[in-house]
């Protein structure tokens, strides 16, 4: 509670109210002489209604609104560009107050709306096939900044968000605390109330974080980017996770399944002549058989200047069949928004 009294009161040092912990906000309001119920009112405005100005908070006394505005900002994102795909999905380039920019995508389907958000601006993992990896990491996002992307897409479509994937820019497990807090806020009835199973985090395989994630109480969904079950190939494609061996990943995923009883997804983007050979298919079958696993076969999306090419649709079909033969559930994921470069791995840093 100590931190609360150290919060800046100088106009020039205003901080984002949403970056305060629950305890800090409670203490601040109590220091301001406010009754306890103000906390809930403010939380509702911030997280459920997505208020971007204290003036919007019409059930707070005017003096309190002014006091809060003197001390805090409400963060918020600005839309720089929105591109609309033929398939109805929309890709947004958003800017935070410090000028950092990220992309996120809204994908409508009937009365459902899936949102793909970024957890970092850029990414330090350097996967060879990914446009985000090529530019390196600018910075990690806060929980509120991740959450704001969902709010922005929700407001733009003016409809309920039914699922969220942390599959935009960045590696969520290199920004674990903020990613998890954002997922919790999305799940919370005080936030958007999205079912935990409809909130998916995708990781390139940061093993200590997977272990930690296995112990979280919510039923969030886990996706692991595998892309090869052959160590040498995976090292070349995903240099950022070289230090975590496939054997270790296999073990830890076994523990994850034992602990949670939930089926993880493995993402596998087929790259012609690299990870689509017979040897690679055999290794993938071995990695997944006798394991609770769902394999998502992704057609590699084109990244400008990349030496990699996607495999044929026939080859993708063959992967699905052969996995099914050894009892592994597999599907081919259709990429949305390809015409606007909004598909997996195509979100890049733009300044
Ligand atoms: N950093 C996390 C989440 C963001 S990437 C991760 O790597 O899992 C989201 C997904 O897009 C990952 O499965 C990633 O491997 C995949 N991806 C990256 N580049 C791609 C490309 N060019 N084509 C298809 N999928 C790609
Ligand atoms: Fe980062 Fe994921 Fe892209 Fe790899 S695939 S560079 S981990 S965003």
Image: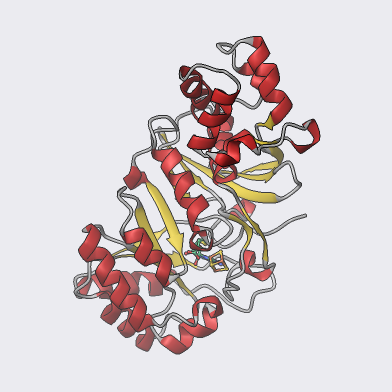
Locate residue 63: give its quadrant. top right
Q: Is 137 in front, or is 43?
A: 43
Left or right, 222 with reference to 275: left
Q: Is 324 in front, or is 350?
A: 350
- The location of residue 92, given as percent across then percent down, is 64, 44
**Which quadrant of the picture is home to ligand 2?**
bottom right
Does any portion of residue 284 appear in the rendered image? yes
Look at the picture and state if 130 lies above or below 4: below
Left or right, 12 with reference to 144: right
Residue in view at x 34 percent, y 39 percent: 195
Look at the picture and state if 137 lies above or below 305: above
Residue in view at x 38 percent, y 81 percent: 246
- The location of residue 36, given as percent across then percent down, is 46, 20
Residue in view at x 63 percent, y 66 percent: 131
Residue in view at x 28 percent, y 65 percent: 256
Does any portion of residue 19 appear in the rendered image? no
């Amino acid at each position: 509670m100590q931190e609360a009294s150290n919060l800046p009161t100088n106009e020039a040092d205003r901080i984002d109210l949403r970056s305060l912990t629950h305890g800090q906000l409670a203490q601040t309001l109590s220091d301001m002489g406010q009754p306890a119920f103000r906390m809930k009112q403010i939380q509702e405005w911030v997280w459920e209604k997505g208020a971007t100005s204290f003036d919007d908070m019409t059930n707070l006394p005017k003096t309190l609104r002014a006091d809060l505005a003197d001390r805090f900002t409400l963060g918020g994102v600005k839309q720089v560009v929105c591109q609309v795909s033929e398939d109805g999905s929309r890709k947004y380039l958003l800017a935070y107050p410090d000028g950092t920019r990220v992309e996120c995508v809204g994908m409508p389907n009937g009365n459902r709306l899936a949102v793909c958000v970024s957890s970092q601006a850029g990414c330090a993992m350097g996967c060879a096939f990914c446009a985000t990896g090529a530019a390196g990491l600018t910075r990690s996002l806060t929980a509120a900044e991740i959450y704001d992307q969902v709010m922005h897409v929700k407001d733009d479509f003016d409809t309920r968000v039914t699922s969220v994937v942390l599959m935009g820019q960045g590696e969520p497990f290199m920004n674990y605390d903020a990613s998890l807090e954002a997922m919790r806020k999305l799940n919370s009835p005080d936030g958007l109330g999205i079912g935990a199973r409809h909130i998916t985090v995708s990781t390139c395989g940061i093993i200590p974080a997977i272990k930690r994630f296995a112990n979280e109480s919510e039923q969030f969904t886990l996706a692991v980017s595998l892309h090869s079950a052959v160590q040498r190939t995976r090292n070349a494609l995903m240099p950022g996770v070289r230090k975590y061996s496939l054997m270790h990943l296999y073990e830890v995923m076994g523990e994850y399944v034992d602990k949670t009883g939930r089926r993880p997804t493995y993402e596998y983007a087929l790259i012609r002549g690299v990870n689509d050979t017979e040897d690679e298919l055999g290794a993938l079958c071995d990695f997944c058989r006798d394991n609770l696993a769902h394999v998502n076969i992704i057609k590699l999306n084109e990244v400008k200047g990349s030496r990699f090419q996607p495999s044929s649709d026939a080859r993708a079909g063959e992967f699905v069949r052969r996995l099914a033969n050894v009892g592994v559930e597999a599907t081919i994921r259709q990429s949305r928004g390809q015409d606007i470069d909004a598909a997996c791995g195509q979100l890049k840093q733009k300044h």
